[in-house]
Amino acid sequence: MRSFRIGSLFGIPIKLDLTFLLVLPLFAYLIGDRVAAVADLMNQVFGAGLPIDPLTTGATPWVIGSAAAIGLFAGVVLHELGHSLVAMRYGYPIDSITLWIFGGIASLSEMPEDWKQELQIAIAGPIVSVLVGVASAIAFVVVPAGYPAPRFVVGYLALMNLSLAVFNMLPGFPMDGGRVLRALLARRRPYARATQIAAEVGKLFALLLGLFGLFTFQILLIGIAFFVYIGASSEAQQVVMKAAFQNVTVRDIMTPWERLNTIERDESVATLIQRMFQERHTGYPVLENGALVGLVTLEDARSVPSVERDAYLVEEIMTTDLVTIGPDADAMEALQTMQEEGVGRLLVTDHHNELVGLISRTDLMTAFNIIQESGSANPASRAGTAD
């Protein structure tokens, strides 16, 4: 998500995603457009005693809609802050809280694997939403009847925050209820297995929610269902891979130096292309007198027109801003680094910054598949193959 920072709370950066700037006016419009219907519902169900005419005169509905929309997202921030503060209490730093089209996300630098910690972090958000809802309900009672617009806003926020708490506790992993489910499952199961079960339940919930949204023509519910389904699948895969790569290092998977295909910086691009075709590799460390000076890929070679490849040298197209990793780093760290940097391979260097190997995304996926099939990690029986 593309976002920008608007401030911080308790040292946690608060960010707005660009999609939030679109959904906030939409929410303000939708709330303002339904002021009369919502007020009538509150009168019938809760005996609120809200007069309809003052709420629907002139620009009042749009002022109410704007205030309620801002208050609603403020409640979302508090909800995420509840998660964040409990996580920080257990020593998990929070990268940021971001408001976007589907609400808010608290970005934890690491997810807890202790079921008690995850349970408390997960339920903290809904508890805060309940408290905000109760506080709004008290404000509704306290505000004099002569101020129907403020009473409507706080009454609406009371209903919505309580509804938010209930909705988030549904078992739609990675929603709060899904995380509570995983925490309870992890009491007697391995963390990875608990995640798989919670993810399957979450995907089923997402399908049902998506179908409900489709048949009732509610696009927002369809979007939430898509987000839940993708989130459940992604996190389950990450956790399973982390469990599989436990105690597996980069050294166990990488292609070692002595088996590595390299190229000199003064070779032509035409030679590089020919070697790529013959050796079926798409990335080469570039050396000068045995020292690492760069990395060249098929994408780099393609930047040179075919008729000019004899005239260009590897050093002219290679990347010198190298992304490296140590041989003793965790295999999962290597995968995360590739994802963060948007690269398909990492050069492996020792503490003297000398090249000792290369690890690619293909190496990691092959090793993961072997571990999954064999049920164990045996580095001695695996050999990396650079792509």
Image (cartoon, rainbow, N blue to C red):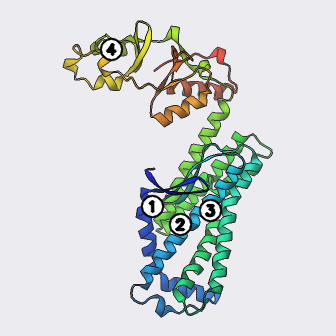
Q: Up-down: is 38 above or below 229? A: below
- Quick one: label 1, few (<14), some, or many (20+) residues within 10 Å? many
Lower sequence index among marks 3 and 4? 3
Q: Distance between the residues labelled 3 and 4?
A: 55 Å
Q: Of the two numbered discs 4 and 2 on the same chain, state the one appearing first in sequence.
A: 2
Could you give the CA–CA distance between mark 3 and mark 2, rounded to whole angstroms?
9 Å
Q: Which of 23 and 186 is in front in this view?
A: 23
Residue under numbered circle 1: 20
Q: Is mark 1 on a helix, strand or loop?
A: helix
Ranked by sequence position, the earlier of labels 1 and 3 is: 1
Q: How far apart are marks 4 and 1 (CA)?
A: 47 Å
Please tell me which residue is depicted at 53% across the width and 66% down the height of the picture.
73
Name the residue carrying label 3.
79
User: Where 386 sits versus 227, above or below?
Assistant: above
- Which residue in the structure is indicated by mark 2? 73
Q: Are marks 4 and 1 in contact (CB under 8 Å)?
A: no
Q: Which residue is drawn at 36% across and 16% down?
A: 276
Residue under label 4, please give it: 272
Give the secondary structure at mark 3: helix
Disc 4, disc 2: CB below 8 Å? no
The amino acid beneath tag 2 is: Phe
Q: Residue at x 51, y 75 (%)?
A: 68
- Local crowd at mark 3 within 10 Å, few (<14), some, or many (≥20)? many
Residue in the foreground of this view, choosing between 17 and 384 = 17
Q: 233 left or right of 34?
A: right
Q: Identify the residue shown where x is 53% and y is 18%.
A: 349
What amino acid is found at the position of numbered circle 1 in the picture? Phe
The amino acid at mark 3 is His
Viewer-side label of 4, 2: 2
